[in-house]
Amino acid sequence: EAEVAQSPRYKITEKSQAVAFWCDPISGHATLYWYRQILGQGPELLVQFQDESVVDDSQLPKDRFSAERLKGVDSTLKIQPAELGDSAMYLCASSLPGLPTQYFGPGTRLTVL
Amino acid sequence: KQEVTQIPAALSVPEGENLVLNCSFTDSAIYNLQWFRQDPGKGLTSLLLIQSSQREQTSGRLNASLDKSSGRSTLYIAASQPGDSATYLCAVRVHYGGATNKLIFGTGTLLAVQP
């Protein structure tokens, strides 16, 4: 069964360093989402792509976060510089355009020291 | 602004019990409501999706209901098993500018089923 792939699964970094997360959606899924889930809370949407275009990045802290999906397939989320408050699980999800069901990857657990 | 609340935050039950998880939302203008399961340190798995025009959905031992007018949904789990232990999240899909829509999640209910 096709799955959303994410790497790395775990990342520990120091404050002010740069980190990057990678996501490979299910083949054929044109819509890709990045979520941040702080411990004990529900996921919050950071950015949504339709193919290579950003359709919603209203909750993305653009002074330090960036996301790209250059060829409309896999995607990278970057944080520079990382802050203590960025410690969270970063989840990627994908869906077929127009369909509501999102398929989630296993996530990347980020710890900022 | 849409807010999603889940009660209780945590629940512990003995194996075999039937249980109900609650979800409430503040704005009834939703496209659908979805229940997810999240195992510790893992991603989310979709359990049930209820369209705004529907009242309930069933899958195996799970039954989800939706009362859009009162802003409530329940997830009923019959004959609970230790393997049901996980965090259960509900999310509503709402319109968000232009042609986009987004999921708004609750904070989840942590369920522990004791053998």
Image: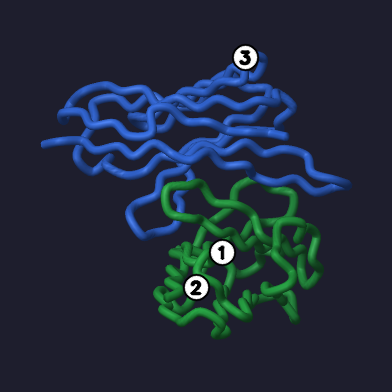
Chain colours: A green, B blue
User: Please, what secondary structure does the residue beneath circle 2 have?
Assistant: strand
Q: Chain of mark 3?
A: B
Residue at x 39% of width, y 36% of height? B109
Q: Quadrant of the C terminus of chain A?
A: bottom left
Task: Measure how far apart labels 2 and 3 are at the Cα level.
Answer: 38 Å
Instruction: Determine which of the numbered discs, if any, sits on residue A37 in the image.
Output: none
Mark 2 in CB contact with mark 1 (< 8 angstroms): yes
Q: Is residue B113 left or right of residue A41?
A: left
Q: Which mark is residue A92?
A: 1
Can residue A2 be seen here? The reply is no
Kindly identify which residue carries mark 2: A6
Residue at 51 percent across and 21 percent down: it is B65
Q: In front here: B50 or A53?
A: A53
Amino acid residing under circle 3 = Ser
Separation (CA) of disc 2 from disc 1:
7 Å
Q: Amino acid at mark 2?
A: Gln
Q: Is residue B58 above or below residue B99?
A: above
What kind of element bears circle 3? helix
- Image location (x, y in percent) of residue B56: 53, 22
Answer with mark 2 or mark 1, whichever residue precedes in sequence.
2
Residue placed under numbered mark 3 in the picture: B70
Q: Quadrant of the N terminus of chain A?
A: bottom left
Q: Mark 3 and mark 2 in contact (Cβ < 8 Å)?
A: no
Residue type, label 1: Cys
Of A63 and A2, the residue lying toward us? A63
Q: Residue at x 54, y 85 (%)?
A: A17
Disc 1 secondary structure class: strand
Task: Answer few, some or many: residues within 10 Å of disc 1's Cα (few below 14, many 20 plus, some between 14 and 19).
Answer: many
Which chain is disc 2 placed on? A
Residue extending furthest toward the left: B115
Q: Residue B98 in the image: state x and y as whole percent.
A: 88, 47
Q: What is the C-alpha distance between the residues marked 1 and 3?
A: 32 Å
